[in-house]
Image: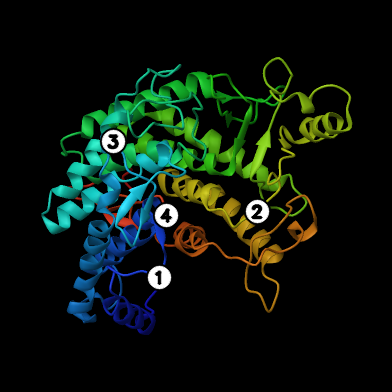
Amino acid sequence: MGLKDIVDRQLEWIAAQDFNKTADAQIDGFDTTIRLIGGLLSAYDLIQSGLVPYANTYNKTQVKALLNGAKTLADFIAPLFDTDTGLPYFWLNTTTRTGFPGAGNTAVDGTIILEYHRLSDLTHDESYRRVADKAESYLLNPQPPPVYPGLVGSNVDMNTGLFTNENAGWQSGVDSFFEYLIKSVVYDPTQQYANDYKNFWTTAVESTSKYLAVHPYGHPELTFITTLNNTGAPLYESDDYTCFAGGNFLLGGAYLNRQDFIDLGLAVTDSCHALFNSTTSGLNPLSYGWYGPDNTAAESQYNGNGSTAVAAREYFNEHGYFIRLDAWGALYTLYPEPIESMMYAWRITGDTTWQEYSWEVFQSLQADGNRPPVAMSSLTDVTQPRAGGQFNDIPSYYFAETLKYFYLTFSDTSLVSLDDFTFNTEGHPLRVQRGTCSTSGRH
């Protein structure tokens, strides 16, 4: 964007930080990796690549501090990997520098390889790659084997490396594990386990197409990816996080020259866009369900003649889904996932329809969330005018992902080209290690 004065101040501030110190009694490795380590590596890559304006004018010592900071952080959280299996603890006690369990899941364990591989390549220190690959090895050889090939559950016992449920899908808890498999191949197709990553991801997408990608009853125009319950049965429900999958299918389909994956990605992304068009606010819900092939919902409250079921059925008949009545079903917290997938759809197909869709979403977001003197906020209920009330919060991913993907949808495709960069799960672009990812001739 050419905002040199802002970048100068940021570089100066970052260079002055001691990443061996924190005021927090505990930190989690997942957010430290995707937000901090990933963000620092990305800033370093963007400047070193010469892509950003004034790249050669920035203080070189301060630019180097970006990479040094990422390394320091990775070293600081290294005790998280001190387990029998190498699967990381979730929390780090910052005083004792010891790890302890928390809300770990497949996504947490499988969202390491991209940042740690990049860190090894930039520092020439293979220790980061080794710990990431060791953790990943349990996910790539799932025990016990999943119900459907490649579609692993959401929980792994870090002491044994065994999966403890069959809660498969592309939803929160599993999502970024799958995301990183193909992105790591795009990042460096010559790396030791590239074929393992590619084959596992390909198997998972093929199984998804066969078993999880479904049309709601009477609505062949929609394609949703169902979540499985803990025993592997379809729930006919999904969440906003799953909408990233459309873009992931598109990226992998273009890279592997799999038109069937591209078609699936477009269908899923189009269906996620439909979630915006059908609410009063023009924004999508967090959690939604539908009636399956036998015209029933997996949850009993949505079947029969009760008031909840009648309301759900009426909404479903018109829109092809219903908003789930859990505590957060209608919540909107400035989600990036559908916008991310629309960006991939535009860049890979060149179809300007995706730009039009993205612009509609941006306008709805501005109309609902921008309430002076508050520039933006999360919103309580997408079924209400202006999406209900406001939460006193703006998630960091609104800046790292949501606004970035909007911006890139309307920028020249040479800016952060998909042939030169791959994005981590927090929207931070990392420079591909070798050659081109060849996602398309144009984008």
Name the kind of residue labelled 2 in the image: Tyr
Q: Which of the numbered marks, if any, corresponds to residue 136?
A: 3
Of mark 3 and mark 1, the one earlier in the sequence is 1
Residue beneath disc 2 = 332
SS class of the residue under badge 2? loop
Quarter of image, res 320? top right
Residue beneath disc 4 = 426
Q: CA distance from mark 2 to mark 3?
A: 32 Å
SS class of the residue under badge 4? loop
Of mark 2 and mark 3, the one earlier in the sequence is 3
Q: Which of the numbered marks, if any, corresponds to residue 23?
A: 1
Name the kind of residue labelled 3 in the image: Glu
Q: Are marks 3 and 1 in contact (CB under 8 Å)?
A: no
Please state which of residues 332 and 353 is positioned toward the viewer in this rendering.
332
Quarter of image, res 312? top right
Residue positioned 48% across, 35% down in the render: 265
Of mark 1 and mark 2, the one earlier in the sequence is 1
Residue positioned 65% across, 25% down in the render: 220
Q: Is residue 388 above or below residue 277?
A: below
Q: Position of residue 266 (x, y in %)?
A: 51, 37
Badge 4 crowding class, 10 Å Cα cut-off, few under 14, some 14 to 19, many 20 or more, is: many
Q: How is colour applied across the structure in the image? A: rainbow
Q: Is residue 182 above or below residue 202?
A: below
Name the kind of residue labelled 4 in the image: Glu
